[in-house]
Image: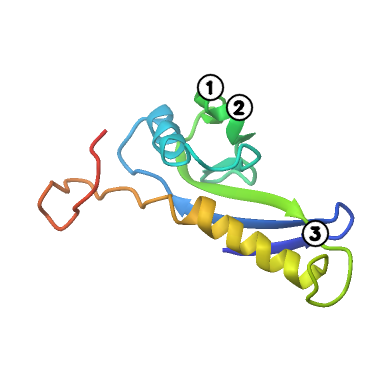
Amino acid sequence: MGIAADLAKSKIETSVEFDGPDHARQLTRVRWLTRQLENAPDELRVEALVEGVEKGPCELLRVLRTEPALLVPEGDGIAGFRLTLATPMGSRRGAEETGFIRSVDNAVDRFHGEVMRVVKPAAARGARAGDGDEGADDA
């Protein structure tokens, strides 16, 4: 997980990168992710990571819920995803409720609880029910 403070915009950005399913069509990979993020914040920014490209397609989750094809890149396939959530930054020093430190704590807690805990790794190719992968859905 990455944490960045944007002082100019007064925002704390928390982010994570991970691999998507290996053997699936591009649109299927995006839908796999959006299904898992059904209760995540609308303002979550989702970026498709494409090998050999510095910046892949990027869109807010609220848009991807209705138009997942916007994240499908031209040419090469999706290697993974980067999820980023921006939250307001505290304006005071110290650990008080309006302080910078508290705002970082709140941003990390929110990102972990609403994003990281709900995204499950892609199932390995050839994995079958009963192979120690209880709870995985094959949808």
Q: Tell me the tag on residue 89.
A: 3
Closest to the observer, 87 or 126: 87
Residue at figure coordinates x 63%, y 34% from the top left: 59
Q: Residue furthest bottom?
A: 94
The residue under the point 59% across, 42% down is 41
Q: CA distance from mark 3 to mark 1?
A: 30 Å
Mark 2 neighbour class, 10 Å CA radius: few under 14, some 14 to 19, many 20 or more? some
Q: Quadrant of residue 31?
A: top left
Task: State the SS at label 3.
Answer: loop
Identify the residue shown where x is 62% and y is 63%. 108
Q: Amino acid at mark 1?
A: Thr
Pointer 3 or 1: first along the chain: 1
Residue 112 lies, in percent from the top left, at 53, 59
Q: Which mark is residue 66?
A: 1
- Residue at point 10%, 51% (across, down): 130
Question: What's under tag 2, amino acid-wise?
Answer: Val
Q: Residue furthest left?
A: 130
Q: Is residue 82 above or below residue 74?
A: below
Q: Secondary structure at mark 1?
A: loop
Q: Position of 124 compared to 6: left or right? A: left
Labelled disc at residue 63: 2
